[in-house]
Amino acid sequence: MASRNTVLLRSFAKPAITASLLCAILVVTGCSVEPAEPSAYANAIDVPPGFPEQQFPADNVPNDHRIALGRFLFYSQLLSHDSDVACASCHYQGASFSSSQAISPGTQGRLGTRNAPSLANIGYKPHFLMEGGVPTLEMQALVPIQEHSEFGMNMLDVINRFENNATVQSLSMKAYGRRFDAYVLTRAIASFERTFVSGRSRADQDQLTAAEQRGRKLFFSDRTSCSSCHGGVFYTNHGFANNGAYEQYSDQGRQRLTGKQSDAAVFAIPSLRNVSVSSPYMHDGRMETLSDVIAHYDRGGFDHPNKSPLIRPLGLTQRECDDLEAFLTSLTDQTFLYNPRFAP
Ligand code: HEC
Ligand code: HEC
């Protein structure tokens, strides 16, 4: 099965790239830049207390037009081969822009191999995909378009579909001062994604029940080491690790990118914000509930040569497991999941 990683490696690591992809990359990285309209992006993008300011590429500072076009595209099925799926089919707002299916079908029902992750706070990520091989959100937007098991499309065909679409052409002119093309498509989608900021959960407001407070203490303790990997304001250190989830991995993880044995079955450490609504869990969505995940960590996971030494039997009581789960659930941000600005 052609996996997305094949595309990823072809696009960003190996010279053997297809003509259309090369064309798309040139457009994406090209330097023809229309001056961004000075716009109060601060109004469009929430910065919750304790969050840093987001950094934007110089040629893609978000403004209302850019975000509006990106929003339209994110929900458009015309990006997919059979006009049957949109970004939002796999990244659903109510699930923190993740999928509630372990493997969500792309165009013509084609299946990939990985679970669609949450896109909450995606604008703050330093690298994308589970092996971390894609450096910018603009480049990431190319991946689903070309990926066989997602949109299975050619960028030029996508652009042609909008040739006579007055709404898209007019928004494109307002947003980037040019007709709709790959440059505009990738930048507009990235602009919309950068608005996906989530930092207003009960845990952020310090309104925790007694059980959640006990869970928080455990989470940030040396007894569990959860926060060594899932710490900080984003509940991830943006690093990579093997957490011993399985006895056998069919996914090479970061090794696919680096070729190193020490990166086999090593995956990007996910953020735990909104984790209670982003089930199922892990790279392939094989763990169904948060209690399955906590039971896994309590057991210390399966042996794997690359398993982090932080993953070891924890000896938690049932109440401690419940407390941890209660704390993880308090990271749910209702203002994010129901914000009408993110809806179709
Ligand atoms: C068929 C389901 C599917 C569709 C359609 C889809 N995605 Fe995804 N998306 C995934 C999966 C699965 C991953 C994880 C892939 C990986 O890490 O290799 C992912 C990863 C991502 C990531 C990286 C997340 C991270 O934390 O690194 C972003 C950003 C993203 N998708 C945005 C989009 C956008 C924008 C679109 C539409 C242009 C889209 N996706 C369409 C399934 C989908
Ligand atoms: C050594 C680093 C490390 C430690 C310590 C760690 N994790 Fe993780 N965690 C990971 C990685 C890596 C993944 C993703 C693995 C995969 O995709 O297969 C993950 C996944 C998860 C997920 C699933 C998230 C999702 O969206 O799929 C949850 C929930 C989670 N961890 C909670 C915890 C808790 C609770 C603790 C403490 C008991 C903990 N983690 C300790 C590295 C770590």
Image (spheres, rainbow, N blue to C red):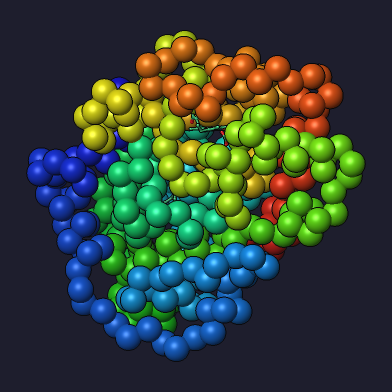
Quarter that holds the N terminus: top left
The one nearer the camera, 71 or 246, is 246
Query: Residue 243 in the image: x percent, y percent?
Result: 50, 25
Horizontal arrangement in the rendering, residue 171 relative to residue 197 (left or right): left
Residue shown at the point (77%, 45%) measured from the top left: 330
Residue shown at the point (75%, 40%) measured from the top left: 217
Residue shown at the point (50%, 63%) measured from the top left: 194
In which of the image's four quarters is ligand 1 placed? Answer: top left
Quarter that holds the C terminus: bottom right
Task: Tell me if residue 324 can be seen.
Answer: yes
The one nearer the camera, 258 or 15, is 258
Horizontal arrangement in the rendering, residue 121 relative to residue 6 (left or right): right
Give residue 187's quadrant in the image: bottom left
Query: Residue 167 in the image: x percent, y percent?
Result: 46, 72
Furthest residue toward right: 210
Give residue 10's quadrant in the image: top left
The one nearer the camera, 252 or 60, is 252
